[in-house]
Image: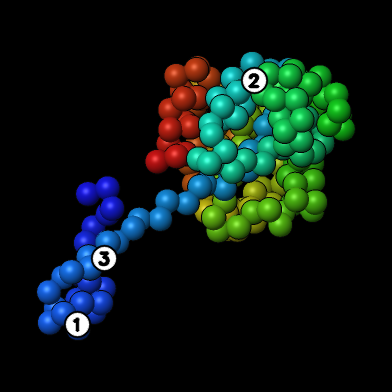
């Protein structure tokens, strides 16, 4: 039934004056809430192609389906939601790739600094209704990964999902801090093809 399931208790209560003959049927309506999504994207050179496709797919979703706030980082982190509001998806992504108009320093990737920036400036945007998506390879140039801050985000959020374009065999190798981040994520998956990106977004909305 498009109206939902029959609410037996409400129907009986409303129809007591009719000797419980159900003249006025009451239906249980399932409330579907839009997911609150916060996206943190590594826009260093090695991540640009994956970030481009992911953000274009994500922002093509109807605003009635999902609420999105986007953040990008390389040597620091800044909110970039305004780029998509002002310029649309294609031009917003193009501007994001250069760091232009979003105050992002395009030097060595620093995940620890990105987490510090996010928690100190934007931490209030995460609640128990928020899904936090981190899109990055976790390669931190041997800096402090600030895993405690990721744990803090995970405790506030509904869930933290990390999408990594590298195969799991490479996680934790070289300057990758991925294995240090794993315990503080609710889900981690390899994501480096258009098909995998589409599946990741489908899982987000499920």
Residue 144 versus residue 72 in the image, above or below: below
Q: Residue at x 26, y 73 (%)?
A: 10
Residue 41 drawn at (x, y percent) = 67, 32
Q: Residue at x 50, y 47 (%)?
A: 34
Residue 3 versus residue 190 in the image, above or below: below
Query: Where does the C terminus fall, quadrant-wise?
Result: top left
Please report whichever mark, 2 or 1, sits nearer to the chain's N-terminal start. 1
Give residue 56's quadrant in the image.
Answer: top right
Please give the residue where the numbered disc 3 appears in the rendered image. Answer: 26
Please report whichever mark, 3 or 2, sits nearer to the chain's N-terminal start. 3
Q: Are marks 2 and 1 in contact (CB under 8 Å)?
A: no
User: In screen coordinates, is 6 left or right of 199?
Assistant: left
Please give the residue where the numbered disc 2 appears in the rendered image. Answer: 52
Please give the residue where the numbered disc 1 appears in the rendered image. Answer: 16
SS at badge 3: loop
Please report whichever mark, 3 or 1, sits nearer to the chain's N-terminal start. 1
How far apart marks 3 and 2 lie (CA) works out to 47 Å
């Amino acid at each position: 039934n498009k109206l939902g399931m029959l609410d037996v208790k409400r129907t009986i209560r409303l129809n007591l004056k009719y000797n419980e003959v159900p003249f006025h049927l009451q239906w249980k309506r399932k409330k579907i809430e839009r997911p609150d999504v916060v996206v943190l994207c590594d826009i260093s050179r090695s991540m640009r192609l994956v970030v481009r496709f992911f953000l274009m797919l994500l922002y093509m979703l109807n605003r009635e389906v999902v609420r999105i706030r986007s953040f990008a980082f390389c040597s620091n982190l800044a909110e970039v939601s305004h780029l998509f509001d002002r310029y649309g998806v294609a031009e917003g992504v193009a501007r994001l790739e250069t760091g232009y108009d979003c105050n992002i320093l395009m030097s060595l990737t620093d995940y620890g600094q990105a987490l510090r920036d996010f928690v100190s400036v934007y931490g209030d945007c995460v609640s128990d209704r928020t899904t936090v998506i981190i899109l990055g390879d976790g390669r931190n140039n041997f800096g402090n990964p600030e895993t405690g801050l990721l744990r803090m985000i995970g405790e506030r959020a509904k869930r933290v999902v990390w999408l990594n374009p590298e195969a799991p065999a490479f996680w934790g190798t070289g300057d990758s801090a991925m294995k240090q981040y794993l315990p503080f994520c609710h889900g981690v998956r390899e994501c480096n093809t258009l098909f995998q990106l589409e599946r990741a977004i489908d899982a987000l909305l499920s």
